[in-house]
Amino acid sequence: MRNILLIAKREYLEQIRGRAFRLSTISVPLLLAVLAGVMHLYGHGVDTSKHVVVASNDAVLAADIRTQLRSGNAAGSVVDVLAPATAEDRAALLKGVRTKAIDGFLWVETDAG
């Protein structure tokens, strides 16, 4: 058992004395710090405002959803209401998303009763 421990200790010391171990010990954390810094700087330049449309056949519900969206994390976003919304409006909204005229839409359907 003593010989196994001596051999393990010798192998361990031999590995940590190597040039590759020293370079990787310094370069890996340095590389991660640089990547974290780049991502942090990139995050500040991203425009967080979005243009969203809330479409519903119930105008009161659509207005309430708009109010909730405006008060939440999307406070800098533009939220429009389209009520009452029809199938043609849905096609127009899909076209708007494809052409990047709007960033997205929320389609809310309620029962007539």
Image (cartoon, helix red, strand yellow):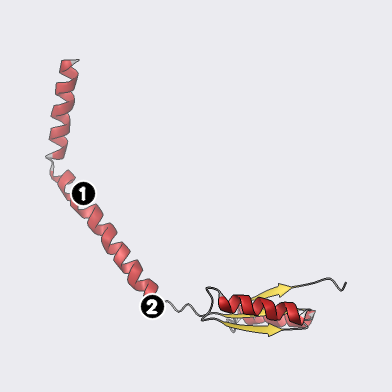
Residue 91 figure quarter? bottom right
Q: Residue at point 57% right, 77% down?
A: 71
Q: Which label number is shown at residue 45?
A: 2
Q: Nearer the viewer, residue 19 or 30?
A: 30
Q: Mark 1 = which residue?
A: 24
Give the mark, 2 or 1, whose residue is nearer the N terminus.
Answer: 1
Residue farthest toward the right in the current orientation of the protein:
113
As drawn, 3 above or below 47: above
As drawn, 74 above or below 1: below
Q: Residues within 10 Å of mark 2 (few under 14, many from 20)?
A: few
Query: What x and y, as percent, mark residue 89?
Result: 74, 82
Q: Nearer the viewer, residue 15 or 72?
A: 72
Q: Identify which amino acid the numbered label 2 is placed on.
A: Gly
Q: Nearer the viewer, residue 10 or 56?
A: 56
Query: What x and y, as percent, mark residue 13?
Result: 13, 33
Query: What x and y, as percent, mark residue 65?
Result: 67, 76
Query: What x and y, as percent, mark residue 7?
Result: 16, 23
